[in-house]
Amino acid sequence: MGVVNVTPDSFSDGGRYLDVDDAVAHGLELIAAGATIIDVGGESTRPGAARVDTREEQHRVAPVIAALAAAGARVSIDTMNAETARAAADAGASIINDVSGGLADDRMPGVMAASGLDCVISHWRGHSADMASRATYTDAAVDVARELDDRVTTLRGQGVDPGRIVVDPGLGFSKHAEHNWRILARLDLLRELGYPVLVGASRKRFIGALLPEDAPMEARDLPSAVVSVLAAQAGAWGVRVHDVAATRLALDTLDAWQGGADD
Ligand code: PMM
């Protein structure tokens, strides 16, 4: 899953694809580089980010989604907003990716159920303005798996088709570095929930912490690709990344390695 943030303020690529044509061109580049899904977002979720007006969010994402879908791409809409999810579905999106797992907008479960689209349900404890204060866990891997399981059960009760659910640990959302690493090391606990697992580690702060403080954002792409390979090896269904070409090569390398095990 390649990321196209149509925002002025995303922490990793904010401001680069605010223009519709640039965003579409970038999405097409990511497909050419080996992405099978393009995740389009119009609201930054970085820590402390301001919420964006719904109409502005839709104005940013709808034309990008329509153009990418018309070009044959499988598009997901990265939004916590039910109205934006609905508008994105109308524009041709085929996946709703809600980092709040349907918690931020109480109309979202209804839109998810009615849309019949695939839905990425992430673990989430609150908006970015105060998510750091909620980063307390007994065992992050166990707690996140349990809370996600509860969330998915609730959504199923609200009519979301279990066959269309993908779960995501929401790395960095109310989680410190040690929590993210614990969750990754015990990805088996998420797999045991019985849904495909999506992992979004790319360029996040805990990846940056592996590098010198003054390292550029792009330097995070190598450790991000390594995490993607390890997540795939641990059974993840998908990885959400910025550098698709490096990730594709890394995953192809894993495939070749695993092919060597075939008799
Ligand atoms: N992370 C971000 C945004 N959307 N969606 C999913 N499913 N999982 C994630 O981990 C996730 C996401 C924040 O990162 P960005 O600002 O680089 O897009």
Image: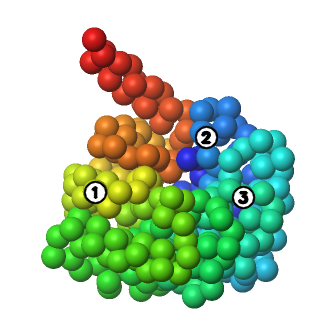
Query: Looking at the image, do the residues carrying marks 2 and 1 touch, with CB atoms under 8 Å apart?
Result: no
Q: Is mark 1 within 8 Å of ligand 1?
A: no
Res 181 visible? no
Find the distance from the CA under tag 2 to the CA under tag 1: 25 Å
Q: Which residue is mark 2?
A: 36
* On screen, residue 260 above or below 239: above
Q: Earlier in the sequence, mark 3 or mark 1?
A: 3
Q: Which mark is residue 93?
A: 3
Q: Is residue 39 left or right of residue 21?
A: left
Q: Is residue 152 left or right of residue 22?
A: left
The kind of secondary structure element at disc 1 is: loop
The kind of secondary structure element at disc 2 is: loop
Residue drawn at the location 77% of the way across and 77% of the way down: 56
| x, y percent for residue 137 | 21, 76
Q: Is residue 62 left or right of residue 112?
A: right
Q: Is mark 2 within 8 Å of ligand 1?
A: no
Res 207 visible? yes
- Quarter of the view holding residue 92: bottom right
* On screen, residue 129 above or below 147: below
| x, y percent for residue 26 | 71, 44
| x, y percent for residue 76 | 64, 57
Residue kind at label 1, given as amino acid type: Glu
Q: Residues within 10 Å of mark 3 (few under 14, many from 20)?
A: many
Residue kind at label 3, given as amino acid type: Ala
Q: Earlier in the sequence, mark 3 or mark 2?
A: 2
| x, y percent for residue 34 | 59, 33
Q: Earlier in the sequence, mark 2 or mark 1?
A: 2
